Image: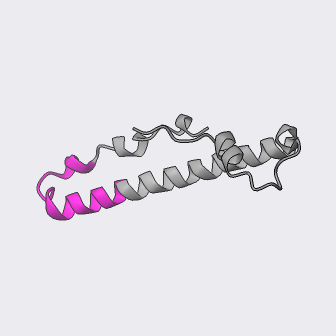
């Protein structure tokens, strides 16, 4: 899998001039990075939950009418570790 930028790397490459001049050494910069990370985690969790629910729904309708336990595997919910979001 391709390595994804960290929040800090993203801030560095998307600097549009108004973030330069030492701002990266401030508490506000660190707060923005932390907020970006938490925001990304929320979206990853929502995406994984949505994928699980879709898989569950599709499997139930298509494949698992007679096998109720086949969709109980919740490994999709942990398919992308939140620790990877930095």
| Residue 10 x/y as whole percent | 64, 46
| Residue 61 x/y as whole percent | 19, 65
Residue projecting furthest to the top: 83
Q: Which residue is drawn at 71% across and 44% down?
A: 12
Judging depth in this view, the residue of 53 and 11 nearest the camera is: 11
Q: In this view, does 80 lie above or below 49?
A: above
Q: Main secondary structure of the magenta part?
A: helix
Bounds of the magenta segment:
52-71
- Tell me: 52 left or right of 24: left
Q: Is residue 69 magenta?
A: yes
- Tell me: 34 left or right of 85: right
| Residue 45 x/y as whole percent | 50, 50
Q: Which residue is drawn at 19% across and 52% down?
A: 68
Q: Is residue 84 magenta?
A: no
Of the 4 image quadrants, the one containing the N terminus is: top left
Q: Residue at x 65, y 41 (%)?
A: 9
């Amino acid at each position: 899998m391709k390595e994804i930028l960290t929040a800090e790397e993203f801030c560095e490459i998307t600097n549009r001039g108004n973030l330069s001049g030492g701002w990266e050494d401030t508490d506000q910069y660190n707060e923005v990075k932390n907020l970006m990370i938490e925001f990304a985690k929320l979206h990853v969790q929502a995406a994984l939950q949505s994928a699980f629910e879709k898989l569950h729904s599709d499997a139930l309708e298509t494949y698992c009418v007679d096998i109720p336990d086949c969709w109980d595997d919740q490994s999709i919910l942990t398919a992308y570790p939140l620790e990877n979001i930095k």
